[in-house]
Amino acid sequence: MHLKLTGHGCAAPRRSSPIDRGTAPGIALQTSGHNERKEAMSHTDMGARAAGAWLAIASFILTVSLLFHGPISPDFGTQMDRIADGGLRWSIAHWAAAAALSFFAVASLIMLAAGSRLTREWWMLSAWALLPVGALWTASTAVAEATVIFNAAVTGNREVYESWWMFAEGQANGFAAMALAFTVIAANEAWASHSVTPHWASRIAAVAGAASVLGWVLGSWLRFPFGAPIWLVGAIVMCLWLVWFGLSLARVDAGQASIRRDAPSGA
């Protein structure tokens, strides 16, 4: 009697595929390359989000500090009286400003290390590199105003006040450097095909940043009394946009959108 085995009783031996035998180098290389690109995009995405978070925090704190700070008087005596009358509010506002300026430096360093689309062009790379320099210069001014200058104004020590105020004025030129850097960043967002904030908002921020630079030159360098209010208003508007910009970068989908913009077209 001859029996014919069918079904599961006698399955034919399975022939090993080329992948099982490890003979598919092309597929392996493609998979490896895809994983490397994915890892690089994840690093860029994470860096942009972290920088955005620091940028938003720094901008919010600086906005509040500027509101309490008020415009600067070109006259030593008038400004000294304002500081003395302000009391502890002046010191707290400048300690907060020093913290915010330090956070700006952190945000810029993270952004430079992330290698996102925001540092692809030479002008954007230069703007983010200029930012920590200006921030650290201005931070030294904030610390001096919160300590020595504040104490000299309260005690009426005009000699110490004027000496340290001149030092603070020199270091505070870093604020003009920061405003210039933010003007470039906002202008780039205004002209970019894709941006994390509306183009109209980026244009307003670019104009506000340029006005802040102009106001600083007019008020601190040329001693025009209307320069300080221009600087202050421009700086506040610029910082409000930076809060928006930073929060948008910090969002997950915004980070993914930046990666899609980095990807070559037609890929």
Image: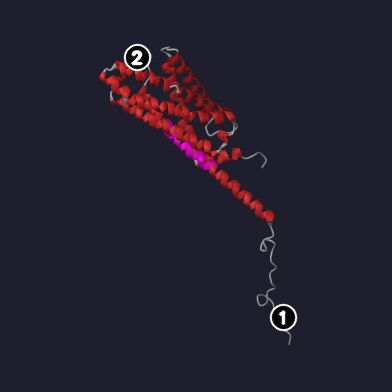
Rendered-image quadrant of the N terminus:
bottom right
Image disc number at residue 157: none
Kindly state the secondary structure of the residue where label 2 is placed: helix
Magenta stretch: residue 148 in it?
no
Tell me which secondary structure the magenta stretch mostly adopts. helix
Q: Which residues are magenta?
A: 44-59
Residue 154 lies, in percent from the top left, at: 27, 20
- Residue 153 visible: yes
The label shown at residue 4 is 1
Say what amino acid the circle numbered 2 marks: Phe
- Residue 155 vs residue 244: left or right? left
Image marks 1 and 2: residues in contact by CB distance under 8 Å: no
Q: In this orientation, does residue 241 appear? A: no
Q: Crowding near pointer 2: few (<14 within 10 Å), some, many (20+)?
A: some
Question: Which of the 4 image quadrants contains residue 220?
Answer: top left
Name the one closer to the observer, 89 or 190.
89
Q: Quadrant of residue 126?
A: top right
Q: CA distance from mark 1 to mark 2?
A: 109 Å
Residue at image point 34% right, 16% down: 162
Q: Residue furthest left?
A: 155
Q: Amino acid at mark 1?
A: Lys
At x 47% / y 35%, what residue is drawn?
A: 107
Residue hosting label 2: 76
Taking the image as shown, residue 243 lies to the left or right of residue 10, namely left
